[in-house]
Image (cartoon, rainbow, N blue to C red):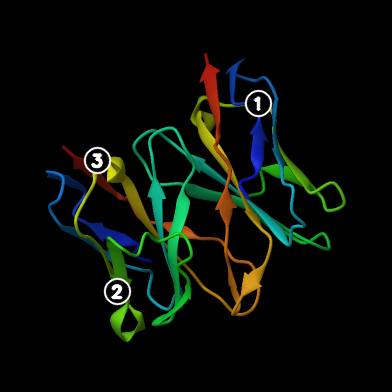
Amino acid sequence: EAGVAQSPRYKIIEKRQSVAFWCNPISGHATLYWYQQILGQGPKLLIQFQNNGVVDDSQLPKDRFSAERLKGVDSTLKIQPAKLEDSAVYLCASSITSGGAYEQYFGPGTRLTVT
Amino acid sequence: QQPVQSPQAVILREGEDAVINCSSSKALYSVHWYRQKHGEAPVFLMILLKGGEQKGHEKISASFNEKKQQSSLYLTASQLSYSGTYFCGTGPQIIQGAQKLVFGQGTRLTINP
């Protein structure tokens, strides 16, 4: 079974530039998550999709971050414009959902450095 | 609100035991445990659900005290491969059938030969 795919793996941009990350979840997984992990901290949920609908985006800085999951499969997270404090690893995860609690499968992440 | 993990770091010799604790100020439906090695993605270890159900690896054991809103992960006869940072993720609610997790700050475990 193929795992969660993410690209790119690394990205270096200057502040005020824009960047986009892509995620392809495990086939058949209805729920997709985007997390931000700052060095030395636990993952912080940015947005959660159930199929192609947003379940929770309460911690997404909506003035600069946006995300979409067209057709309920792969997803894109965008930052525009980027700030220095956005430097982090962006993790995508997916899980099967049917009303219970299920393990999340994480992708390798995208390490973003904003200079 | 973010759960609190303790200790923040622990160093063991191979074969020794360790306990990692996770405490929340909110009522919990579930507690998830993940291990992350440096530069890699978090890997699922175990889920503990309200009511006593558990799902996870056979060699990993954990407890979930619903009344105290606490969970502990038990690593016995530690191996070098157990090294990494352990995160608990607490799930206070289920939204539209999906579990939202809030992760702790992590516990760094180092196993020396």
Mark 2, Cα crowd under 10 Å, few <14 / some 14-19 / many 20+, is: many
Q: What chain letter is assigned to the residue under label 3? A: A
Q: In this rendering, would B21 be left or right of A51? A: right
Q: Are marks 1 and 3 on the same chain?
A: no
Q: Please tell me whether mark 2 sits on a helix, a strand or a loop.
A: loop
- Which corner quadrant of the image does residue B13 belong to? top right
Q: Nearer the viewer, residue B68 or B30?
A: B68
Q: In this rendering, would A102 be left or right of A27? A: right
The residue shown at (39%, 82%) is: A52
Which numbered marker is on residue A74? Answer: 2
Q: Please tell me whether mark 1 sits on a helix, a strand or a loop.
A: loop
Q: Are marks 1 and 2 on the same chain?
A: no
- Where residue A94 sits: x, y (%)? 44, 66
The reply to whether discs 1 and 3 touch (Cβ–Cβ < 8 Å) is no
Residue A85 visible in the displayed image:
yes
Mark 1, Cα crowd under 10 Å, few <14 / some 14-19 / many 20+, is: some
Q: Nearer the viewer, residue A87 or B55?
A: A87
Q: Which residue is mark 1?
A: B7
Residue flagged by tag 1: what amino acid is it?
Answer: Pro
Q: In the figure, A85 relative to A110: above or below?
A: above
The residue lying furthest to the front in this view is: A63
The residue lying furthest to the right in this view is: B67
Q: What chain letter is assigned to the residue under label 2? A: A
Q: Which residue is mark 3?
A: A84
The residue shown at (51%, 33%) is: B85
The residue shown at (57%, 26%) is: B79
Residue flagged by tag 3: what amino acid is it?
Answer: Leu
How far apart are the alpha carbons under marks 1 and 3?
A: 30 Å
- Where residue B95 sits: x, y (%)? 60, 74
Q: Are marks 3 and 2 on the same chain?
A: yes
